[in-house]
Amino acid sequence: MVKVGIIGSTGYAGVEIVRLLTQHKDVEIVWFGSRSYVEEKYSNVFRNMFNIVNAECLDDNMEELADQVDVIFTATPQGFCGSVVNEGILNKVKIIDLSADFRIKDVETYEKWYGIKHQSPQFIDEAVYGLCEINRDKIKDARIVANPGCYTTCSILSIYPLVKEGLIEPKSIIVDAKSGTSGAGRGAKVPNLFCEVNENIKAYGVTTHRHTPEIEEQLGYAAGEEVMINFTPHLVPMQRGILVTAYADLKKKVTYEEVKAVYDKYYGNEYFIRVLDKDVCPETRWVEGSNFVDVNFKIDERTGRIIMMGALDNLIKGAAGAAVQNFNILFGFEENEGLKQVPMFP
């Protein structure tokens, strides 16, 4: 059994990690870290865990936790993991960090977009970006895995094959994305109250959203050149889900069959990425509660552009499920262990 500790276990992503790992046959969760609920019974915080998790919440002492487990999940805000990780801890455990602390390789870019100083830049180069379908060979030997952002995962996986194969102009990409309210976290914020969100849709973080440089950096690696995008996220009145609709100029005229072959080349053997049938658009309801990503595309011959689409559950494939997928790769388990849940409907 692999011993696991979770810091930030009482956030939305944290409780999803707990839910998924309780279904994993090779895991023992020994530490439920939570700064907000120290010494409170975990099942009192989340009643869905009644008679499933009987432990109490502990603090977020990573030094102490590192002596008790094999891997630590940090489902924490930006800045936490970077402020506490050190060489001694990394010599004892592997870390799967769900924040942005180790996603972006350029420290100045991270500090500019997140508005905080990075406390452990010495570990950035060795951290592996944990988008499993693209980086699994690097992930298996990592000490730190930087779990991708939710918007980022959906955007990159929708666009990646066409960037990688050079079919689209990399500086023409526009990403329009929509997310449920759980993407903003569990903390109390006025803009996320029911009366503020219900019966409403709004753009936010226009030209400034923090996932922008993450998407640009990863697509830049695929393109072999700098990528600059327009990324506009929207908040919609639902609990879960991300829908991405991305647009780009085609470099040449292509047929449906040619583009479909490109997607199948990269995703044909991927368990969690489903390339949909022709003319079927991804919908969030068909991936809810699962680690699946549905992707598809439509060629606009009139404008010479292509529309790339993707849908996922932001709390699972966009956070906790991807973290468990990374965990499976790190410890040599089947990649879909604990993650075979069929999407929920209705």
Image: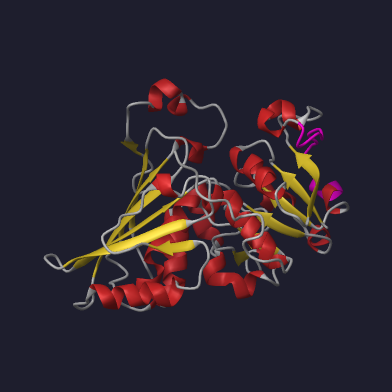
Q: Find out whether residue 57 is within the magenta segment.
A: yes
User: As drawn, is 11 to the left or to the right of 310?
Assistant: right
Check the image and report above or below for 270 versus 229: below
Extreme residue in the top direction:
195
Identify the residue shown where x is 57% and y is 53%: 100
Quadrant location of the N terminus in the rendered image: bottom right
Which of 313 and 78 lies nearest the eye of the viewer?
313
* Quarter holding residue 250: bottom left
**Is any part of residue 132 visible from this angle?**
yes
The stretch in magenta equals: 51-64
**Is any part of residue 213 visible from this angle?**
no
User: Picture coordinates of residue 141 (x, y %)?
Assistant: 70, 72
Identify the residue shown where x is 60% and y is 46%: 78
User: As drawn, is 91 to the left or to the right of 138?
Assistant: right
Check the image and report above or below for 176 versus 236: below
User: Picture coordinates of residue 99 (x, y %)?
Assistant: 60, 50
Identify the residue shown where x is 18% and y is 77%: 253
User: Picture coordinates of residue 221 (x, y %)?
Assistant: 46, 73
